[in-house]
Amino acid sequence: MNTTVFDKPQQAAAHLEPVIWRKVNRLLVRKALAEFAHERLLRPTLLSTDGAWGHYCWEVPEQGASYRFRARLLALDHWDIDADSIVRQLDGAEAEPDALAFIIEHKQVLGIGDDMMPVYLDEISSTLYGSAYKHTVPSLSAAELTRADFQSVETSMMEGHPCFVANNGRIGFDTADYRSYAPEAASPVRLIWLAVHKDKATFSSTSDLSYQRLLDEELGAAQLADFARQLAARGLNGDDYLLMPAHPWQWFNKLALAFAADVARQNIVCLGYGQDAYLAQQSIRTFYNVSQPGKRYVKTALSILNMGFMRGLSPYYMLATPAINEWIKRHIEADPYLAANGFTILREEAAIGFRNHYYEQGITKDTPYKKMFSALWRENPLPLLAPGQRLMTMASLLHIDAHGRALLPELIRSSGLDAQHWVQRYLTAYLTPLLHCFYAHDLVFMPHGENLILQLENNVPLRAIMKDIAEECAILNPDAVLPEGVQRLAVSVPEELKILSLFTDVFDCFFRFVGAVLDQSGTLPQQAFWREVAQCVLDYQASQPQLADKFARYDLFAPEFTLSCLNRLQLGNNQQMIDLADPAKNLKFAGTLRNPIADYAPR
């Protein structure tokens, strides 16, 4: 635990300086204007034009507040707003842009209910708090990040999910927790190890990994002997227990309390901290071993509210997780096209889930209270590297450093390739395998920036490595014949919504921002970027003529596609945006978007 904040309580707010606070509020108001306008919650009025730029005004209904700003409309109704141009007027007088006031002013426009408003304001406050921290602490520049190691890039990201306005809520962390566990704090963390009775816990793994081998490789003989001694000293038989890690916050705030009955009855025995130090990843509940970088990632349940979900892990999902990962990996490797591309996944090789029978008996519906105590181990990508290669989170392609400089243009410059050819290599590594998984296998992932690692050589993308598999992938065919234990992958999705797994998740939620960064920086005009996207799709389709019927049924060159709105989802239910068992039923739509590659449709 970070003791500095408790020794010097002023440190908890040391980064909340007036100049920085004004800066991060302006940036978040810009994002709110841009993303809420993109989702048609706001409809700014064009006052005048200045070349490609327009001068806009948005009058907040019945609030006496208005916003004037300069902006360009890019592909997919992306609002490129000049942050410095934003002028807020309140009852006729100029006022400083204030993100919390913005949300309150727009309560009716955004449809935020009284019961949800306090939590959403907390999420906005926490997002501002974290943004101020990231703009205050020393950090690597965009140019320096093109030469930085994997974890330095991971901990340097300034922004969370590009679409969500409240994207760093982390409700549950206090200010000391923030400095101990937030990815950007880059504080080494030691996990807490617990012995859990086999009557309440279940271990599962891939067919090539045993429980004993996992422990030998992750803990080592000395640590295992120490844990065995602790159990024996209590008069307990170590063979009756499984060993599993927990996030320190989860132990102190949830497990020792909510599972007190199991602790008292020695169904759970706390063995103390492990020896290895870890760094929290962008996904916050996943840890990378920095003491021994060749070891596996560890992912733990973490009962904080962040971006529409309590970040738990279901013990029921954990039971099938290794089998699902093993099946998907074999499925991918057996496909010659994907094998030639190099696309791969990081398998979640082993998992342990612990069931609290009180919550299970007392609550019949799905609830985060049933997902407080599980862990999994994921493969490490480092063994995939050859000499001269490196790894970067794909989220880094959207990174803007504290000085306003974008990483992607610097990365392209450092590669020696021109922007067009670099983008071609990137699309081959990232988009092509997603197209093939969808069209050839009905297989979809959640391929946003944080869920994907790029393997680079001379800063040129070689291949995409997908992670976070079991909870965020699906087979869009309920009749698919799948092995036992893998059946939950098959989901029923309305036919017209299947293609949104590409249009929404790839085009609107990632490429929209990549194209904007390239255009804003003068690296590659947005039209040229989308032309390359279209050419990538055309090249793929030409290579797979046997799939022509599916290309026609799920047409990536359709003139327009349905706008699926993520902020509307979060505003509708910021405790649980979607039901993972039926992800389509909660989606919120707002008209259509013009497809930026429609003009390149094959004739």
Image (tube, helix red, strand yellow):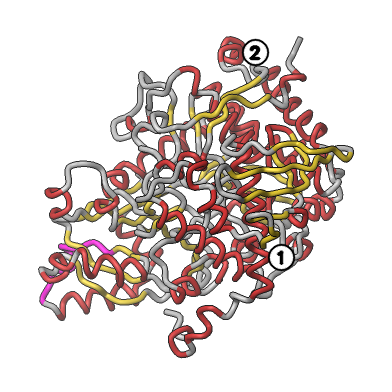
- Which amino acid type is marked by label 2? Pro
Say what secondary structure mark 1 lies in. loop
- Which amino acid type is marked by label 1? Ala
Residue at left 60%, top 39%?
42
| First to last magenta residue range | 235-243
Give the residue at mark 1: 402
- Residues 163 and 435: in front is 163
User: From the viewer's perspective, is 515 left or right of 245?
Assistant: right
Mark 2 residue crowding within 10 angstroms, few (<14) / some (14–19) / many (20+): few
- Residues 153 and 51: in front is 51
Q: Position of residue 76 (x, y in %)?
A: 68, 32
- From where the camera sits, is residue 297 visible? no
Q: Quadrant of the N terminus?
A: bottom left
Mark 1 residue crowding within 10 angstroms, few (<14) / some (14–19) / many (20+): some
Kindly report the distance in space between the C-alpha atoms of the residues bearing marks 1 and 2.
47 Å
- Residues 269 and 142: in front is 142
Give the residue at mark 2: 545
Say what secondary structure mark 2 lies in. helix
**159 falls in the magenta region:** no
User: From the viewer's perspective, is 557 left or right of 531?
Assistant: left
Q: How many marks?
A: 2
Figure quadrant of residue 14 = bottom right
Residue at left 38%, top 59%?
304
